[in-house]
Amino acid sequence: MQKLIFFVVVSVCGGFVLYPLAFLVLMALNTGPPTAWPPEQYGLANFAGLAHSPAVLLNTLYVSLLSSGMTMVFGCLLAWILSRTSVPGRGILEQLMGLPYYVTPLLGALAWAALGGPRSGLLNQLWYAMGGRAPLVNVYSPLGIAWVMALFEGSVAFVMISAAMKSMDPALEESSQVLGAGKLQTAVRITLPLMTPAILGTAIFVFAEMLGSFSAAAILGMPDRFFVVTTAIWTLILRFPPDYPLAAAMGLSLFAIMAGLMYLYGRIVTAGSYATITGRAFRPRVLKMGWMTWLLFAVCVAYLVLAVVLPMATLGYVSLLRFVTVIPKDVHWTLSNYQNAFEMAPVRSALGNSLLLGVATATIGAVLMAVLSLIIYRTRMPGRQLLEYVVMFPQSVPRMVFGLGLLMAWVVMPVPVYGTLWLLLIAYLTVFLPLGVRTLSGVVLQIDRSLEESARVCGASWLYQVRTVTMPLLRPGLIAAWMLLFIASVREVGASVLLVGPRAKVLGPAILSSWESAGTQLTAAMALVQVLVVFAALAVLVATVGRVWRAGDE
Amino acid sequence: MSSSGPAQIEVEDLVIRYGTVEAVRSIGFSVTRGELVTLLGPSGCGKTTTLRSIAGLETPAAGEIRIDGRTVFSSARRVNVPTERRDISMVFQSYAIWPHMSVFDNVAYPLRVRRMGRRDIDENVQRALELVQLGDVARRSAAKLSGGQQQRVALARAIVFSPTVLLLDEPLSNLDARLRAEMRVEIRDLRRRIGITAVYVTHDQEEALAISDRVIVMNGGVIEQNGTPSEIYNAPRNAFVADFIGSANLIRGRIRRDESGDGMIALETPGGRLVYGVDRNRTAGTEGVFAIRTAYPVLSRARPAGARNVWPARITRRVFLGDSIEYLVDWEDAALVVRTRPTEEFDEGEEVHLALEPRHCVLIES
């Protein structure tokens, strides 16, 4: 029984992860007619084609570097303030720092577009009203994309760096001071070298995520025809006839870079573990900052305002307007945008589908990923390390690229899965494997192995043991995994945009296409509905588990 | 050994490997019905691994294990009975009390697995809890118990279904010293009352000597000695056992055949002193080593009567330990450690006489 379950789970996962990637590789090597399948001719011409248009690649690198730089400034500064200084309200601020992660890049980009669009952006409208001529800010720019992404990723970087700061034994610094080194010397000789692996690792992780990000670049880059790899792939697929081979070559190149970076990240984190991952949480020494405390407090609040409050308020404001304006006498309040959002058939079906998919992904995913975590961390099954590798693999594949592989893999299949919600379900279950397995395995590893062994010694079979001991102890992990998977599904964009069809719309891509075709106000209303669903799920999670969970990746 | 014999657990040629490391190197022993045998040794000696393979929680690389005459593991015959069908019971070092269940549910678990009727379950659980003096906490949540209480719950759960074999993996190591001494006696009494066969793993020699019918001393994956507590203490087989159990002085020398007599042998030290001792049927070549427990040498100011094994010596260091005083005594070129009662006081630098009873000088294998 045990072996049968394991076998089924392993083969299903292996298939889900590897099958689309195999298609991606084949398609990238296809030099015959772009839409023919199976390919009539193989070669490397598609990759050579990439070199002829280096602009897209350079754009991607430029935006990613810019944004990673800003992210690291946010992350390091916030982590240092909240774990090493006596800033008031640290406990609450630390919890709140998780919030920007739940305000998606899509929503952030929409809000900042409404604020800083060159003509009708609210900030620029104010500026013109005050007599300005040229736009004050223009978020339709590489800097704008980087800014929005950095506000979002700053939260991720904060969590990673402050975790490392907290696991550093303060005695390491204290003994330096006892031996006669001053505060500055201690910082330079002890603290900084100990923190370097964590900071470097975070920077690489963030950079890799940035390379594969899509929504912000789609909303803020495409109006000015500024393309990064992900948006370029999108347009290659949407145009007629679609150029699958070139898109696949682009996707594969992006994947190669990202996988390389993720490998490097893994190496740095393991190599640096001497300092950071001791498995113990210490109470770090807190610096008394005097009057500076309030300045630091203001920095934290400012980040939260820019990343959460301002975007939400902007979208809320815009969604209640008939025309987007800041001139008080022109303001006409209305609820018609929400009425439209709930009444228009495509929007309604997208909302319904997203909720349905969210529940399905979370329910199937939580069970599947619990079994996977148990196999990987609780059995001696041969090949379980390989399984762990396969399961974690999707985190080094950009969502968009994974969606592309799935698209090509299922378009040619005689099974009518393409263009239905089933394909989206498959895609979600696959790309969220790392998120779910990491969440659950964290809990699995906390369960003392002897709790399970003693059930066996008492005479229980494996299934009986799982039912009576493992699953009840895993309950908080299962709840957390369910909520995180639900949230991740409802807000998903990158993999979905290529997989939605006329009969299978979901919220993320619907918001994107509404942004392109309908007005800002309706889009804002839809985005707010989405984020409210996410926050509702988050509230349930916090209420049951007691804290904001660190969610893995975008 | 035949299955009808009194041996209830038989381990033969057991080899356990982790990757390329041999944690257990071909050991064998047996435990008779109703006996408590302790596997004793330093951490990493293979004792817990051996216990876990009896339970079926580890898969050995080679060897055979029989419980009650039934082969539960055999590398040659490719038998490996899963843990739950070996009909054994075990107490874990961490107690492994399930925090999501009440005390009652924890103890009732093995009975529910065995599909016992509700009334029988109530009765058996109550009896088991009373045996460990926890009759009044049955409805409490197991997560809210103290360490000592968890230990008792673990014991109750292990005996509630009247198993024939009980395995205990360092069950007392997480308790404080006072509680440990108390539980030690309790486990011994409880086991005698229910007449269960037990294998007990510990690294605490005092615990092993106090609780066991027989002690198996392990080191580096092999068995160093297998004997009763007093054999292990009074006649250590080799230097490792002599050193690991209690503490001992080792005296080396040349064996003088010509001086032996009245069942004794004599050892001539490099300094020319003759030490008389017993050989315990152990054979040695021309060189031999005596082990002498630190509690046995007698110090005195006046020269005691008798000519054998009495020498002048000098106190070089004195450490007051409360229950005893430990002296470092200059004896020939070596320094001997001597533990005396706290009333036998000597000063550092004082010249004394040191006497060794020949029966306490035991020849060990070298």
Image (spheres, coloured by chain):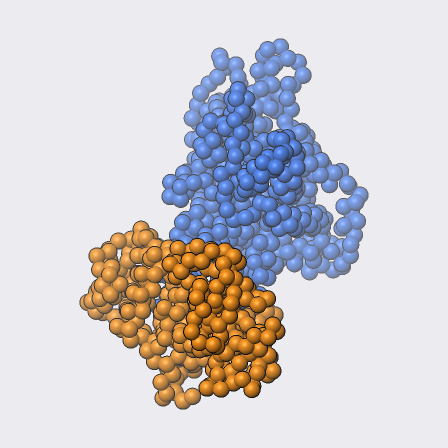
- x, y percent for residue B232: 44, 74
Quarter of the view holding residue B124: bottom left
Q: Is residue B6 left or right of residue A320?
A: left
**Along the line of sight, which residue is nearer the eye, A365 or B33?**
B33
**Along the line of sight, which residue is nearer the eye, B336 or A311?**
B336
Tell me the quadrant of the picture where the N terminus of chain B can be found.
Answer: bottom left
- x, y percent for residue B168: 38, 68
- In the image, residue A13 sits, relative to residue A170, either above or below, namely below
Chain A: colour as depicted = blue
Tell me the quadrant of the picture where the C terminus of chain B can be found.
Answer: bottom right
Q: Which chain is orange?
A: B
Question: Which residue is located at x 58 percent, y 12 percent?
Answer: A129
- x, y percent for residue B108: 28, 64
Please give the count of numbered marks on the rendered protein.
0
Question: Which residue is located at x 35 percent, y 59 percent?
Answer: B180
Question: Which residue is located at x 40 percent, y 73 percent?
Answer: B229
Q: Is residue B345 left or right of residue B128?
A: right
- x, y percent for residue A111: 55, 28
